[in-house]
Amino acid sequence: DSGVTQTPKHLITATGQRVTLRCSPRSGDLSVYWYQQSLDQGLQFLIQYYNGEERAKGNILERFSAQQFPDLHSELNLSSLELGDSALYFCASSADEETEAFFGQGTRLTVV
Amino acid sequence: TQLLEQSPQFLSIQEGENLTVYCNSSSVFSSLQWYRQEPGEGPVLLVTVVTGGEVKKLKRLTFQFGDARKDSSLHITAAQPGDTGLYLCAGVAFNSGYALNFGKGTSLLVTP
């Protein structure tokens, strides 16, 4: 158990809908990272937050957004969902921006 | 665009054999990490290499970081069925916090 908690574990929704994925980092970790894993693209970095502020952006679509709250948990919002958004979404957390990150078990999103 | 190229993509071997997985890039990284991922789980960190030319050993696993910090290899001696899984390399670019650039992974199957 990495100490990073993601909910829900599975999510099935229809095209055009909006979903919210939640991540609780390890106790004391200030940095949260979101990744998307698909069969064709592999693991892709989406976005990073540090102590409530956005720090780095990767291959995140404009339909996706995220935030980190004062209690340090983070949410990833996916809107206008398309079939191609079906993937595993991972959250990782680290103590700061220079130490190793630990991954949660992921949320499997299926868009039908 | 995948910054890190892993080879081979798939590997099926028998228990007791040795194997090497390669991770190559044209980019220089401040550090490189190796993860193992099992189905339905998040990636689990195996090792971090930081210094060019560095070699780290973890029981039967040997990790090497290239002198130019652009490539790395993972060598497994006397593979066991418990080594089965997806092996991922990930590079940390300079001044990027700890956002990881992942390779697509090497899927290893070790049969008894």
Image (spheres, rainbow, N blue to C red):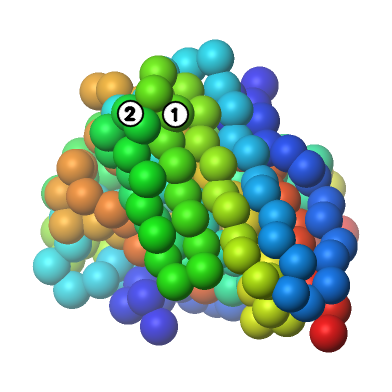
- Residue underneath mark 1: B66
Q: Is residue A106 visible?
A: no
Residue name at image x 58 percent, y 53 percent: B75
Locate the C terminus of chain B and report the quarter of the image it occupies: bottom right
Classed neighbour count for the residue bearing mark 2: other residues with Cα under 10 Å, few (<14), some (14–19), many (≥20): some
Checking the image for residue B12, the label placed there is: none
Q: Position of residue A27 (x, y in %)?
A: 18, 73
- The image quarter in which residue B7 lies: top right
Q: Amino acid at mark 1?
A: Gly
Name the side, left or right, on which A27 lies relative to A11: left
Nearest to the observer: residue A23 or residue A67: A23
Task: Please state, as top left, top right, bottom left or bottom right, where the N terminus of chain B lies in the image.
Answer: top right
Query: Which chain hosts label 2?
Result: B
Are discs 1 and 2 less than 8 Å apart at CB? yes
Residue A109 picture location, percent across and down? 69, 62
Q: Nearer the viewer, residue B70 or B59?
A: B59
Disc nearer the start of the sequence (1/2) = 2
**Disc 1 packing (10 Å; few <14; some 14–19; many ≥20):** some
Camera-side residue of A32 and A2: A2
Q: Position of residue A69 (x, y in %)?
A: 23, 57
For mark 2, what is the residue?
A: B52
Say if B47 sits above or below B26 in the image.
Answer: below
